[in-house]
Image (tube, grey):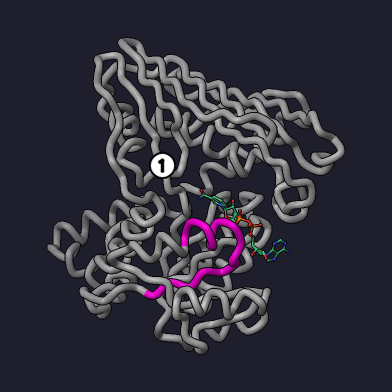
Amino acid sequence: MKNRRSFLKATGLVAASTAFAPSTLWSATHPQNKKLGVALVGLGYYSTDLLAPALQMTQHCELRGIVTGSPEKIPVWQDKYGIKDKNIYNYDNFDQIANNKDIDVVYVVLPPSMHAEYTIRAAKAGKHVWCEKPMAPTVAECESMIKACKDNNVKLAIGYRCQHDPNIQAYMKAAKEKTFGKVKMITSAAGYFDGRTDHWKQNKALGGGVMGDMGVYALQGARLATGEEPISVLAQTFTTRPEIYHEVEETAMFQLEFPSGARASCHTSFGINMNYLNINYEKGWIRMKPHSSYNGNNGEMSNGTIIDFPIDNQQAKQMDDDALSLINGTDLLVPGEEGLRDIRVVEAVYKSAKNNELIKL
Ligand code: NAD
């Protein structure tokens, strides 16, 4: 690859080769002033309460389609959002979306066990894919999703809304610029009390368990604060409500070691309300609380800098950032590869907790 690039550079062909990459061709033929049409797959809590309202605020994309297995939801969504009959699909006829020019992006908002299937079907239909976190329950599924999108020349973004939030970007920047020197130790927590008793989050086959759900926020806190990938994981999982959490864990605690020597202690739970990130550096600290909420993420640095950037709507920002990347043919902020990085650690957490051993990555 390096050789090919240096050859192209030497012959002045880099710009030409980039200009004819399939994704660039798509953006070149897509009218720059036209909003992208988004179809939401799965009309549960997150689509209903957060994404559809946010899509009323976006500048570069709009809600045009729905994919649902619940026919009773169709008139409600049509009344509220004026969705055309021809842009409504169920899980059986979903693949026909390939013939629908109104839809540019399919946003998969289903239980995690269904993410791979619907991402791959959307890619084969020639649609760009936005997929909710956790990307999928296994590394193998994540890899198959990335491959399907590559094979079909479409882009894949993961719905890590926080990475689009300027408050989170502030501590990411400190990692990059080494503002306070090397990271020494991080504590990161993300959890809430979930009172539901029969939901996919408590079902193993559907991709439940707190580690993939809230654990990835604690993990992202540590990964983004160091800007590194962990090299070892030591984890424990446990449950205080076995009558509800008998298939999956209610709580997970995991320690990470990073190549620079930084260590992180991460906690996540469906039984405890907690949301913070403390980063201790050689020459200072950053404290974020909350660090992964829908709004109000804020913090403070040891040099007195306050992190409190205004953001109208995190999900609208995320979807507009991703739509603009597609329109302009630029790199996505959170591509499939970033979702995969987390799932690699999630798998190691489970393996470590199961065998009570340190897992080297
Ligand atoms: P939900 O249970 O409220 O909705 C899930 C939807 O999937 C429902 O419409 C349901 O009918 C549908 N579905 C189809 N087949 C199903 C099956 N076999 N079992 C259960 N449901 C089925 O869940 P949610 O909270 O909306 O979560 C959906 C996705 O969004 C998950 O990946 C979740 O992690 C993610 N999410 C992300 C955020 C975030 O902040 N980025 C927040 C909430 C949820």
In the rendering, at what x and y percent does residue 250 appear?
A: 73, 35
43 inside magenta stretch: yes
Q: Sort mark 1 into few (<14), some (14-19) or many (20+) by Cα contacts within 10 Å.
A: some
Is 185 left or right of 354, judged from the image as shown? left
- Find numbered disc 1 in the image and state the secondary structure of the residue it sits on: loop
| Residue 152 in sight | no
The answer, for residue 111, to whether it is visible in the render is yes
Give the extent of the magenta segment: 37-51
Whether 53 is drawn above or below 195: the answer is below
The answer to whether residue 9 is left or right of residue 267 is left
Query: In this orientation, which residue lies closer to the viewer: 278 or 153?
Result: 278
Residue sitting at x 71%, y 36%: 350
* Mark 1: C-beta under 8 Å from nearest atom of ligand 1: no
Question: Relative to the observer, which residue lies in front, 33 or 275?
Answer: 275
- Residue 294 in which image quadrant: top left
Front-lying residue, 269 or 193: 193
How many discs appear?
Answer: 1
Rendered-image quarter of ligand 1? bottom right
Report the residue marked by disc 1. 295
The quarter of the picture where the C terminus appears is: top right
Dot 1 amino acid type: Asn
Q: Residue 119, position in %: x, y?
A: 55, 66
Residue 289 image point, x, y percent: 44, 27
Identify whether 120 is placed above or below 231.
below
Picture coordinates of residue 142 (x, y %)? 57, 55
Residue 258 higher or lower than 349, as above or below: above
Q: Quadrant of the N terminus?
A: bottom left
Position of 136 compared to 208: left or right?
Answer: left
Q: Is residue 117 above or below residue 203?
A: below
